[in-house]
Structure formats: C-alpha cells, structure tokens
Image (cartoon, grey):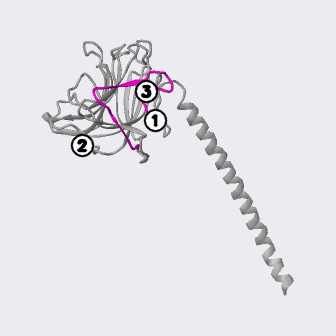
Amino acid sequence: MRILIFAILLPFYFINCGTYLLLTNQEQNDKHAFLDLVQLTLVNSSIGLVHYWPLDGDTKDIVGGLDLTTVSGTPALTADRFGFPGKAYYYDGSGAYHESIAQGSLFLDGTVSSFTVSAWVNGKWPPGANGGQSIFLSQDGGLGMQFYALSAISCTGRLRAFTNNSGGQGDADVSSQCGMYSENTWYHMVFVWDIESLTASLYVNNVLVNSGKFGNNRPWNTYSSFALGYSPLGTFFYQGSIDEVRVYNRAVFPVSSL
C-alpha cells in the first residue's frame, strides 16, 4: 500500500519541483530585466543634463556650477515630497527668492535648440491674479513655469509653462485647463521644447496635459539670470515649495527618475 501511494505522489512531486524551478528562473529574469531598466533610466536621465539643483539644504548646481544666491530675504528650508525635512525650499510670497549670479553661462544662451526643464513644486494660486504672476521658475522674461490664475475669466488651478522672445513673436505657451489641480500638493512639472517638431509640451506627474506647435525655432530671451520663486514678468511672488530642479539641453520625455 505504501509503495502504491509513493508511486502516485512521486510524479506530482517532480511536477511541483519543476514549477518551483520555473518560477525561480522567471524571478531571476524579472530581477535582471528590472535592474537593466533602472540602469537605462539612470543613464537616460543624465544624458544632456546641464544644470541640477537638488535643493537639499543649499542652492548649489551640482552639474553646471550655476549656483543660486538669496535675494530680498531668506527662503526657508522645508520638507520635500517624501516628508524629509530640510530637503526643499519654501518661498513665502513676500519677496525672497533665489537667483543665479552668472549672467551668461545658462542653458538658454542662444546655442541650445531643444531643452527640458523639470521641477517638483507645491504652491498656491494667487488671489486676483492678472495671469502673469506666481511664476516659480524663470530666466528673466524669456522662460516661465507658473501656478497660473486669471481673475478676469475666473481661472485658477492651472499649471503653465511658456517662453518669450523679444517682441512676443513665436512664443511657446502650454498649460492645463483651469481647475485641474489643487493647492498645497506636490506636482512634478516637466516642460519640453522639441526643435525637430517645433513642439512644446507640458507634463504633470508624467502625464501629458498640453502640447502644441509653435513657429519660432528659438522662442526665448537669452543671456539672463535664472531664478526660483520669482519672475520680472509678475509682481506677485511665488508662495510655495520647490525641489529637484533639472535642466537638459535636449528633449527628455518624463520618466520617474526626473
């Protein structure tokens, strides 16, 4: 009787053993594939990276050397999107901001065609805005990323990115619809200008929210200071937090490592 039971169970044992080996091999393959993906993602996210401000307790540009200095007060260190204290900067809207000292060694220096700007932001929409305020990232008047609000059309809750050239011809301007986003929430904004297709695109949390074609192949001012928390286009200073600002000299479409 024991011999018969053993003879019946033995095939199932080897089948289960084979299944276990198959799952183990699959797990190993998945692990290698995941590691390859991580490596490719890290490599991709570093190609063309010309400026990187981690904002982890200071305002040093650890890639391009374009360090920022404090202007009109002191932006406060605050928690980042993960809740780690001192890993992002908060701008209180009263006038304090960060600005580059250099006036020419920037990515928008007249030699770059495509570019990408990536930032994590958590802010407020200004009350009674005129549409040109609460710009949290800028290069003088030639580039802006913004918490957009315009009281004339009862629009708020909109995220926007734009460029300007002298005279305002061929500006690239992309934004979400009004009311799409809330205050006091971390958002990952990525602004991409692709010279090959003359296309500007805005991504929020890796989702494309707006894209359009624009006729000017270099729609921006050049040789101006770079700033966080301020733009000369508006009178209302940005109120909110900024973290992990990256600039690329090519079109980089969002991945989670940006």
Helix or strand or loop: what does disc 1 sit on? loop
| Circle 3 SS class | strand
Q: Check disc 1 and give the amino acid type.
A: Pro
Q: Which mark is residue 254?
A: 1
Q: Residue 185, image x and y in percent?
A: 33, 45
> For mark 3, what is the residue?
116
Decide: is 27 above or below 61.
below
Residue identifier under label 2:
179
Q: Quadrant of the N terminus?
A: bottom right
Which of the 4 quarters of the picture holds residue 66? Answer: top left
Q: Residues within 10 Å of mark 3 (few under 14, many from 20)?
A: many
Q: Nearer the viewer, residue 118 or 219?
A: 118
Say which amino acid is labelled 3.
Thr
Q: Assess whether residue 77 is covered by the magenta stretch.
A: yes
Taking depth in this image into account, of 230 and 175 the one nearest to the observer is 230
Q: Quadrant of residue 182?
A: top left
Image quadrant where residue 223 sits: top left
Is residue 213 shown left or right of residue 12? left
Q: Residue furthest bottom?
A: 1
Question: In the rendered structure, which segment of residues is drawn in magenta?
Answer: 58-80
Q: Secondary structure at mark 2?
A: loop
